[in-house]
């Protein structure tokens, strides 16, 4: 099979203009696809969020498995290129004696508002969903990382999938889908009943908590993906900040933008991780 046939076989459908605009990332992506390696670079927006957050995600699994000795079930809303799914899977294999499963829910479609979300990262994301390119990369990464044995896929929107799942069946639920306020608040509210007592609800992209931001602008910008806070001059996701505040009504335990809370009956409690700065190690697949 020649190189042109290989490129066609792995489903590369980007235009010459796309390739020229991001040549190095594209070539690395192409090399990873052809040599059966995982890819989490800037091409197709595959590298989302700070890699350091994935260390704390795995620490949450380690902390939970100290007292939970049975099979662990983890539900992920929003998977994109598979970086977080692999993070969870490898943590479960490492720290849970009886292992478990990771269920990924994602429609892999363009969910951004074309009027309010106009930054270059949003342009990349829109292109990534064309011809199912990001979904194909997700499948490639899961298979190549050798975690397809415990990762399952439910392709569809949260509203479509939710009725298919039973309450109190998951140990950890991770929310990282549409970051507009209405979507993330509904995801938290609708999927919390699926969590076991003592389970952990967590999510991504909480760069700033409600107490730290300008309260008047967050209401106006709550359905934008990412904006700059006029009070701190820091970029953040207003929908995430406002949704977790409105739901939990208190400070949230958060590390580098990754947040988590433990369910205790009808209440929630913060989680404390005993981690020293020199102990932070980025998971291998994201280095």
Image (spheres, grey):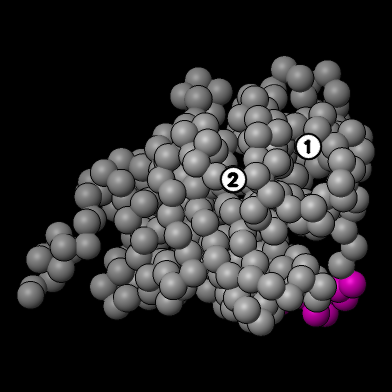
Eye-nearest disc, 2 or 1: 2
Measure the C-alpha gap from mark 2 to mark 1.
23 Å
Left or right placement of residue 276 versus residue 70 in this view = right
Using the image, determine if residue 141 lies above or below residue 215.
Answer: below
Q: Main secondary structure of the magenta part?
A: loop
Residue hosting label 1: 244
Q: Residue sitting at 38 percent across and 74 percent down?
A: 144
Percent coordinates x, y for residue 99 in the rendering:
60, 76
* Magenta part of the chain: 274-283
Q: Secondary structure at mark 1?
A: helix
Q: Position of residue 201 (x, y in %)?
A: 74, 50
- Residue nearer the viewer, 12 or 141: 141
Quadrant for residue 54, please give it: bottom right
Other-residue count near label 2 (Cα within 10 Å), few / some / many at <14 / 14–19 / ≥20: few
Q: Residue at point 55% right, 66% down?
A: 101
Of the numbered discs 2 and 1, the one sitting upstream in the chain is 2
Q: Nearer the viewer, residue 274 or 225?
A: 274
């Amino acid at each position: 099979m020649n190189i042109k046939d290989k490129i066609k076989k792995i489903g590369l459908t980007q235009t010459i203009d796309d390739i020229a605009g991001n040549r190095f990332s594209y070539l690395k992506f192409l090399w990873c696809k052809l040599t059966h390696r995982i890819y989490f670079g800037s091409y197709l927006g595959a590298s989302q969020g700070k890699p350091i957050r994935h260390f704390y995600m795995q620490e949450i699994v380690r902390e939970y498995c100290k007292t939970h000795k049975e099979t662990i079930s983890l539900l992920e809303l929003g998977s994109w290129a598979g970086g977080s799914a692999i993070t969870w899977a490898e943590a479960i294999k490492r720290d849970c004696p009886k292992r478990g499963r990771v269920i990924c829910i994602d429609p892999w479609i363009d969910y951004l508002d074309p009027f309010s979300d106009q930054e270059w990262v949003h342009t990349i994301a829109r292109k990534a969903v064309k011809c199912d390119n990001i979904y194909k990369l997700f499948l490639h990464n899961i298979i190549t990382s050798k975690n397809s044995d415990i990762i399952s896929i439910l392709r569809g929107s949260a509203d479509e999938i939710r009725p298919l799942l039973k309450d109190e069946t998951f140990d950890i639920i991770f929310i990282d889908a549409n970051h507009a306020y209405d979507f993330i608040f509904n995801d938290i509210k609708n999927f919390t009943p699926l969590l076991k007592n003592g389970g952990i609800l967590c999510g991504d992209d909480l760069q700033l908590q409600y107490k730290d931001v300008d309260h008047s602008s967050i209401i106006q910008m709550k359905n934008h993906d990412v904006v700059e806070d006029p009070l701190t001059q820091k970029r953040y996701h207003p929908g995430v900040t406002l949704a977790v505040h409105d739901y939990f009504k208190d400070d949230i335990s958060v590390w580098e933008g990754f947040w988590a809370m433990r369910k205790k009956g009808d209440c929630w409690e913060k989680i404390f991780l005993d981690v020293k700065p020199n102990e932070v190690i980025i998971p291998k697949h994201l280095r």
